[in-house]
Image (tube, coloured by chain):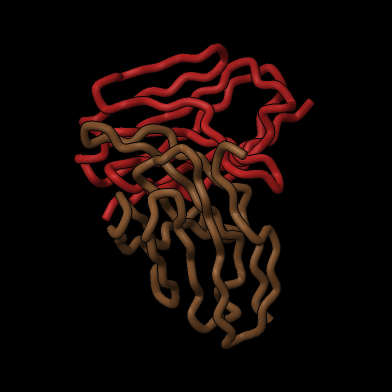
């Protein structure tokens, strides 16, 4: 299917466990992003990537790890999940042209609950 | 990094009236300013955007204005309808996207 997809859509995990959220896009967009959405905080950037093998921290990177070995995939790993990481996670992608981005397209979101 | 502030956090308007949401940004290098609408349980979706070399853009009932000198931009929705009820986010972009904290717009029938 064309577009940007996240998996799983819902996940419940225990404190201390490692969990990986997957994100796949079919447009070959250069930029990919991970956001978390919490009530009252809007969308906060966790990590982003401008191209394969290039990643940068966002506003709230602690406790998260990303990789981008292929342009189309951008997995997000919680190394040791904590209750404060309970949130809705959105992956997004965008093309960058001449120093400016185009529209960011969002995946469906992953609702993660850490118990 | 970029800091985007958005006001108001909630807004209620009578159906048919206009709604205005305002945002400010801190990084003068930001050059792309999209607005997203998010309905309950759904993903954010672009409704309109503006680039730094443009002062105003309109698409039917929706318009966005940008003041680069003051570093603020605004979303204007005219002739509001019940289906406009949603959360709206502004963003500023230079590489990554920094979002405001959102405005919950409620249209009162």
Q: Is residue A13 above or below residue B74?
A: below
When asked about the image quadrant of residue B82, the answer is top right
**Which is more toward the observer, A39 or A99?**
A99
Which quarter of the rendered picture does the C terminus of chain B lie within? top right
When asked about the image quadrant of residue A9, the answer is bottom right
**Which is more toward the observer, A108 or B106?**
A108
Which chain: red?
A: B
User: Percent position (x, y) of residue A34?
Assistant: 46, 57
The residue lying furthest to the right in this view is B109
**Which is more toward the observer, A94 or B65?**
A94
Residue drawn 68% across and 17% down?
B16
User: Percent position (x, y) of residue A107?
Assistant: 57, 47
Is residue A74 rendered to the left or right of residue B104?
left
User: Percent position (x, y) of residue B60?
Assistant: 55, 12
Which quarter of the rendered picture does the N terminus of chain B lie within? bottom left
Residue drawn 51% across and 58% down?
A41
The residue lying furthest to the bottom in this view is A16
When asked about the image quadrant of residue B85, the answer is top right
Residue drawn 64% across and 67% down?
A112
Residue drawn 59% across and 54% down?
A6
**Which is more toward the observer, B100 or A97?**
A97
How many numbered tags mark residues here?
A: 0
The residue lying furthest to the top in this view is B60
Which chain: brown?
A: A
């Amino acid at each position: 299917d064309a577009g940007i997809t996240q998996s799983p859509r819902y996940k419940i995990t225990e404190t201390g466990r490692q969990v990986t959220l997957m994100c796949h896009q079919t447009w070959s967009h250069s930029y990919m992003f991970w956001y978390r959405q919490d009530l009252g905080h809007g969308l906060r950037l966790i990590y982003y990537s401008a191209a394969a093998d290039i990643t940068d921290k966002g506003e709230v990177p602690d406790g998260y790890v990303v990789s981008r070995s292929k342009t189309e995939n951008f997995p997000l790993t919680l190394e040791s999940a904590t209750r404060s990481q309970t949130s809705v996670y959105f992956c997004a992608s965008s093309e960058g042209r001449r120093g400016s981005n185009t529209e960011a397209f969002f995946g469906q979101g992953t609702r993660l609950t850490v118990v | 990094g970029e800091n985007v502030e958005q006001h108001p956090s909630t807004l209620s308007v009578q159906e048919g009236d206009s709604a205005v949401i305002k945002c400010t940004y801190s990084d003068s290098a930001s050059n792309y300013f999209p607005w997203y609408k998010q309905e309950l349980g759904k993903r954010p979706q672009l409704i309109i955007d503006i680039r730094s070399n443009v002062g105003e853009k309109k698409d039917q009932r929706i318009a966005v204005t940008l003041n680069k000198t003051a570093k603020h931009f605004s979303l204007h929705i005219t002739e509001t309808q019940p289906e406009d009820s949603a959360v709206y986010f502004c963003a500023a972009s230079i590489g990554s996207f920094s979002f405001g904290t959102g405005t919950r717009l409620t249209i009162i029938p």
